[in-house]
Image (cartoon, rainbow, N blue to C red):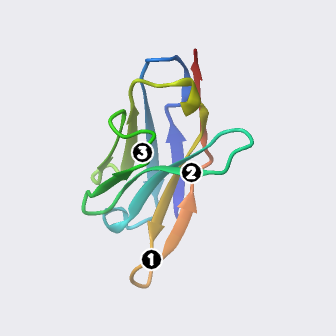
Amino acid sequence: QVQLVESGGGLVQAGGSLRLSCAVSGSIFSSTTMNWFRQAPAKQRELVAAITGGGSTNYADSVKGRFTISRDNAKNTVYLQMNSLKPEDTAVYYCNAVRLQGSFTYNAWGQGTQVTVSS
């Protein structure tokens, strides 16, 4: 069973930084695409950043230049470094692990971590 545990959320002032971590167990991590989503109150969940097993990255336009996704395959962990935070970044952030090839496939989610940015 693939399990994801997020950490690193909290309260920060606008302009500040936070780093989220997501530790993954039970997966073939090196060939897993890792995503960070977020969901603000009364809004749909949206993709914030993604990183493939090969290290290719993709970002939502709203976070480009401010957020950086990275992974440490030795630690089975993905990170989201968030700089220059804005009040509109306030949301619950979810880690997502996807592997669709081969015989061991999964699409797993973490429990979410709250990020609150005060103005």
Q: Quadrant of the C terminus?
A: top right
Q: Earlier in the sequence, mark 1 or mark 2?
A: 2
Residue located beneath label 1 in the image: 100
**Residue at image point 52% right, 63% down:** 2
> Which disc, if any, is residue 61?
3
For label 1, count other residues whose C-alpha is less than 10 Å away and answer few (under 14), some (14-19) or many (20+).
Answer: few
The three-letter code of the residue at mark 2 reads Glu
Q: Earlier in the sequence, mark 3 or mark 2?
A: 2
Q: Position of residue 111 (x, y in %)?
A: 62, 47
**Residue at image point 57% right, 24% down:** 87
> Which disc, if any, is residue 31?
none
Residue located beneath label 2 in the image: 46
The answer for how far apart the CA atoms under marks 3 and 2 are is 11 Å
For label 3, count other residues whose C-alpha is less than 10 Å away and answer few (under 14), some (14-19) or many (20+).
Answer: few
**Residue at image point 38% right, 42% down:** 79
**Residue at image point 42% right, 45% down:** 61
The answer for how far apart the CA atoms under marks 3 and 1 are is 26 Å
Q: Position of residue 117 (x, y in %)?
A: 56, 22
